[in-house]
Amino acid sequence: MNLPLNDKSPARKQTIAVVGDARCAVGSTSDQLAEELGCKLIDSGFRIVTGGLGGVMEAACRGAHHSTHYQLGDTIGILPGSDPAAANRYVDIAIPTGLDFARNSIVPHADALIAIGGGAGTLSEICFAWMNKRLIISLGTTGWAGRLAGERLDERIRYKDLPKDKIYPATTPNEAVKLLSRLLPTYNQNARLCKQT
């Protein structure tokens, strides 16, 4: 049975992948950046998708729950294992994949990706986001996110109308969300145009 679409139904909330240090300590710089970012993303009307485990992933989801705009379903965890109980306690929707490290190819299919610190796993997620032509923002100065801030991963032209396309650097969560709000509509428009041609 096909149900009629209601013109008053709310628009889909865009999902932002937050990736980074899986083992950062509570109270560390990466933890604080991720928690503040999570809150600001929800305040700005986004949903958060992470790998669902600890460190930056947990801090971003924890921050989301601190937002006065938080709603159940705003935090999504794409888990590497098969057990949904492995998700951190702030994940609303746990999606177990059983894919281990291959899960890193799924998380970057969000509308955009923000990376904080990170090692090889974070680097793989940044690479997948780059290949999938997603907007990428680096927050902070540590790890692979910090090393790649302001850089292009390779010489491919992802969008001809975005000659300054790169991994955009941000030093604060507020700056990251402002970049996201300013640049995401342009990336979305270019992605739609690419699909039409």
Image (spheres, helix red, strand yellow):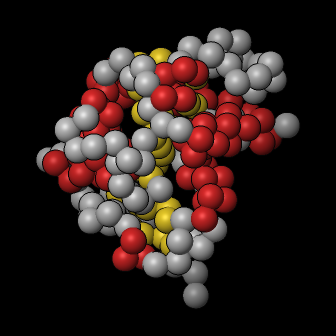
- Note whether residue 112 is visible: no
Relative to residue 15, is residue 127 drawn left or right?
Answer: right
- Note whether residue 91 is visible: yes
Relative to residue 14, is residue 174 drawn left or right?
Answer: left
Residue drawn at point x = 58 percent, y = 87 percent: 1
Residue 34: % across, % down:
31, 38
Tell me if residue 154 comes above or below residue 4 in the rendering.
above
Residue drawn at point x = 40 percent, y = 59 percent: 53
Residue drawn at point x = 44 percent, y = 32 percent: 117
Q: Nearer the viewer, residue 140 or 64?
A: 140
Tell me if residue 29 comes above or below residue 109 in the rendering.
above
Q: Quadrant of residue 77?
A: bottom left
Question: Extreme right residue here?
Answer: 197
Q: Quadrant of residue 27?
A: top left
Residue 38: % across, % down:
30, 42
Q: How many marks?
A: 0
Residue 36: % across, % down:
24, 35
Residue 186: % across, % down:
58, 26
Q: Nearer the viewer, residue 97 or 177?
A: 97
Could you tell me which quadrant the C terminus lies in?
Answer: top right
Residue drawn at point x = 71 percent, y = 12 percent: 163
